[in-house]
Amino acid sequence: MNLDDVRAFVAVVDTGSVGKAARCLNLTQPAISRRVQRLEETLGITLLDRESKPARATRAGESAYRRCIALLRAAEALARDSRSTIAAGPLRVGLTLALSEAVLASAIEAVRDLCPAVSLRLVADRSAVLRRQVADGQLDAAVVAERPERPLDTAHATPLGTERVLVVVPTDSPLPDRIAVADLAGQRWVINPDGCGFRAQLDRALADRGAPVEVVAETWGAGLQLALIARGIGIGLIPERLLVGSSWRESVRVVTVDDFAPALTAWMVTGGPLGPFDTAIAAIADTVRAFLAEDAVGEGHPGEQSRQATVAGV
């Protein structure tokens, strides 16, 4: 299999046309077409739907495209490793939305300080999306979140720490300081959109008691969630590590729910060894570990020690 043929096919799918792929690779359109055809002959499948505009991969081509991306990534890594042990060039890393607001800037600074030649490209998305992109070769690594009772394969993932959330209400909420999860039925929520692991745990907890999650506002982002909760729009699920230092801290109250303690474990997931880039990945992992270790709550329910804390978004 010729890597130039693979690059031509990937370029056509990425750009949506043979002409654009030719410009990207500094080749003629007939040369791109010949390379794609040669790859099709090598694999024995039709890779492109030539009736569609923009150009799209066939179903078999979509599967081949993901493998071609991984192949090119591996070839790039091999070339880098053979040239130098110093990390340099682009590094694509995903960060779960549950942690991105808190650690993204710190992660960039850590990599910049330790590996100044690395061009870090951080993207924030849902954990399921990030894991798929790592598997498909679109990302080199990703920090994802998973429920503690569902650990990932440690051959490809490293645990970084556990994040817990508190139920937070406006200071004048009629809810008492200590409740059961059944008391949350009928409450209106300011909460992350579907795809958030904490929200999924709340969905299950209330569904087990025959109650839906009544959503008044769906949004990512600490600032807006804080403002809405403080103004009495609804109640929320807030990570315990993000309680300190907010200007809203006097406008919210933490409620202890005896039979509901949602948590997510953060993992660093990679598609395989990254050679000299391992140092940069370790720097990002250490940034997340340090964040999750800050102000760690002692024994007992987290709400007991953060009764009047202010919150940020999940």
Image (tube, rainbow, N blue to C red):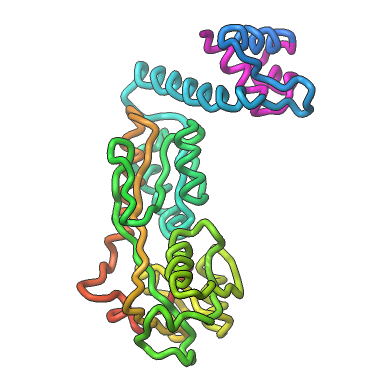
Left or right: residue 255 compared with residue 67: left
Q: Please indicate, yes or no, whether residue 208 appears anywhere in the rendered image.
A: yes
Task: Kindly identify the residue that appears in the image at 40 percent across and 78 percent down.
Answer: 181
Task: Kindly identify the residue that appears in the image at 36 percent across and 32 percent down.
Answer: 277
Left or right: residue 312 compared with residue 45: left
Left or right: residue 62 compared with residue 48: left
Left or right: residue 174 compared with residue 32: left
Choose between 306 and 122: the one closer to the eye: 306
* Spot occupied by residue 228 in the image (x, y as percentages of width and height): 57, 78
Choose between 242 and 105: the one closer to the eye: 242
- Look at the image and say whether residue 192 sits in the magenta stretch: no
Question: From which residue to which does the magenta span run?
Answer: 1-29
Task: Kindly identify the residue that appears in the image at 51 percent across and 50 percent down.
Answer: 124
Q: Is residue 201 above or below residue 186?
A: above
Q: Please indicate, yes or no, whether residue 314 appears anywhere in the rendered image.
A: no
Task: Kindly identify the residue that appears in the image at 36 percent across and 70 percent down.
Answer: 240
* Spot occupied by residue 1 in the image (x, y as percentages of width and height): 51, 8
* Spot occupied by residue 314 in the image (x, y as percentages of width and height): 46, 64
* Spot occupied by residue 232 in the image (x, y as percentages of width and height): 56, 85
Q: Is residue 109 above or below residue 169?
A: above
- The image quadrant of residue 44 is top right
Q: Is residue 121 above or below residue 215?
A: above
- The image quadrant of residue 291 is bottom left
- Look at the image and say whether residue 16 sits in the magenta stretch: yes
Q: Identify the main secondary structure in magenta.
A: helix
Number of labels in the image equals 0
